Structure formats: structure tokens, C-alpha cells
Image (cartoon, grey):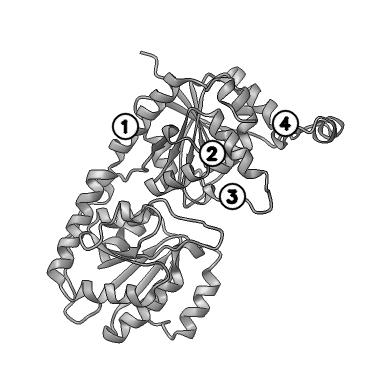
Amino acid sequence: MIRPIVASYCTTFLKPEMLHIYRQVSGLRRYDTFVITRELMCADRFPLENIEALPTPVQPIPRRMYLKFIKRTDALHYRGEAEQLAGLFARRHADLMHVYFGHTGVHLRSFLKEWERPSVVSFHGADIMLREHRPEYAVHMLELFGIVPLVLARSRSLAERLESAGCPPEKIRLNRTGIPLDDYPFIAREHPQDGAWRLLQASRLIKKKGLHTTLLAFAKFRTLFPKATLTIAGEGPMRKELELAINDMRLGDAVTLPGFLREPELRKLYADAHIFLHPSETTEKQDQEGVPNSMLEAMASGLPVAATFHGGIPEAVKDGVSGFLVSEKSPDALADALVRMVSDPVAMGEMGRRASQSVREEFEQSRTIGKLEEIYDEAISLGKPSPSGLRS
């Protein structure tokens, strides 16, 4: 039996923090795939045989100037990328294209409109934001919504934002990224008798992760539990800022920044920790989370969560059941939630068990892959929208 083929387009395959994309692309069961990328990264960490790494297109300058200034075509055409993709699909068959990230879909929209096969685009969080310096971007996103039969969102909160941005609700499908549960077995933890609680956050070091809220809450928590420690695993542009804040708050002996960790190292941190923090916040530019993958991994291993009512987090963490949720940018409330949690170790252990069970029920990898392939089936069945359904 011939298996259908999906071309998975990801501009960079893959940045270190994109493990969830790798799990999805490499975990397909009923579909074959090949990856189209413009920059090959971390090939040792994310091995995949079937990759089409496109070179930088070479467009003769006169033709480039003609297409850009006379014909006024978009960048995809005057740079030569559209021709490059057309050549690729002339020699490689695909029944469907899955474009990872909304801004990439906007960039590719003219090719997606011309290509004979249907495409789907998945939104993951920051890619729903509009571009203040590009007022035409909102119009281009509306055009993208008209070109594709289905639009994928990692969380219900992102689906609502897509609808607010003009995406027809009947086109939106929930696309959870799954967790391989065999790698994150439940661990029953011993609670410290001396108050040496081990707290953990694993995320990119960027503003929407609420890292200053984490530090302020931990500092307050530590006034009651002076032997408590905090590990913030990850890399990003805020590292120096966090190092200065840790020094100013005199937390240098209690807070560790080990940098970006591979899966085995991160799994050990989960196993050694007692509580997972993820107090995400919406930035000034309205950057918002889907459902943080590190949080799901931690929950699968049995860690209760202290986080915020933000983005897709409440879709995974039930307040008072698998963790505690507080308002964004509320370090005092977060600290109080931590104190409430450790004040009843028996209830805290039950929270961890419920956290693990909820991930197994909603985010198990084979289940989410199965639902993704059902979306692929539907998109192929629907085909490309009729020209009358496309927005110009």
C-alpha cells in the first residue's frame, strides 16, 4: 500500500529548543515525510534521513530588480525562492505540505496559492503576533487563511487568537505536540524533612517565560525555607540580565543556571526536583505561550506545577488539582502558592500523580500523532479552497 506523503517545511531544522517539532515530524506512522529547510542545524541532535536542504537561491540582479520594482512581486519570487520550490516539487511528489510557524506560511503564501496541492500551517505561539513595522502583515495573514484548507493551533487559547485575527473558525484544528511517556515515567518523590526543597524551571531565557517573577517568588519562599534551591535550565538573551538579578538579590548560593540541557540531563533534573515553575506572561507585543513542552515533561514525571493563568497553560494544569495557577506577573501570589503546596506534602504528592495522569490522557505522543494524521487526511480530502475563497 502506498503511503501518502507530507512535505514538512521548517525554515531552520532544527533550533535546539524545537524538540517538539522533531518529535512530531519523526513520529508520523501512516504518512511518509521529507523535510524542506533553508538552514540545517543540530543534525546530531535531530537526525533525519530525508531532508531537502535548499541552498540560497541565486537570482540574476537584472531579473531581481525587474521582479521587485517593475512587476512588484513579493520577496518569495524576486529572491528566486518560488522557482526553487517549484523545481523541488517537480522532482518530488507530495500530497500535502505542512508549514511550521505562521510567519513562514505568510512568507510562502504566494507559492502555496500557486502549488497544485493543499497545505496546512501550524501556529505555535509567537507566530500569531502581528508586525508593527509591517502594516500589510495582517492582510497577508488573512490571505494565508484563505489559501489553506486547515489551520493548526497548539492550544485552544491560540485557536481563539487565530479566530480574532480573522481565521474562519471552521478551518481551525487543535494540534497538540505530544510527549513520549516512556522517556518520562512517573516518579514518587521523597519530601525533604529539612526544608531543602528543589524548585525547577526549564525554558528559553526570554521575557514571556516570567523569569523575574520566578526569582522574586523564590526569594520570598526562601525566607521560610532557607535551604531551598532553584534551577533555571535553558539559554537565551536574558541570561546576563538574570545573572545580575540573582547577584543583586543575593541568591547566588541558591540559584543555578546550567544552560541548555539535552534530554537525559533534563530528565535527571525532573527526577531530582520537587516542584516545577512556569509563570509565563504576555509581553508588550502580545507574545503568548501555547502549552510549554518542558512543563508537560515535568508533569509526566510527577512534578506538581506552580504557574500562571496564561495562554494554553490552564489547558494542561488544573488549578488546585495538578498544581496551582496565579495571575501573571504576581510574584507574591506565586510564592504563596509554593508555600501552600509544600505545607501539605501528602496533597502535594497527589497533585504530582494527577499531573502525570493528565499528561497521559491528553498529551501522549502516539495519540497526538494519530490526531495530526487525521488532520492531514481531512486537508487532503478538502483539497485547496476554490479561488473564490481566496482573499487578495
Circle 3 sits on which residue?
A: 130
Left/right placement of residue 26 relative to residue 131 reads left
Give the residue drawn at x 63%, y 38%: 140
Q: Marks 4 and 2: which is nearer the front?
A: 4
Residues under numbered marks 2 and 3 in contact, where contact means CB atoms less than 8 Å apart: no
Q: Position of residue 75 (x, y in %)?
A: 72, 37
Q: Residues within 10 Å of mark 2 (few under 14, many from 20)?
A: many
Q: Position of residue 281 (x, y in %)?
A: 44, 63
Q: Residue 370 bears which disc, if any?
A: 1
Q: Earlier in the sequence, mark 2 or mark 3?
A: 2
- Residue 230 placement: quadrant: bottom left
Q: Earlier in the sequence, mark 1 or mark 4?
A: 4
Circle 4 sits on which residue?
A: 77
Q: CA distance from mark 1 to mark 4?
A: 36 Å
Circle 2 sits on which residue?
A: 10
Farthest residue to the top: give it. 1
- Residue 107 placement: quadrant: top right
Give the residue drawn at x 15%, y 61%: 350
Q: Residues within 10 Å of mark 4 (few under 14, many from 20)?
A: some
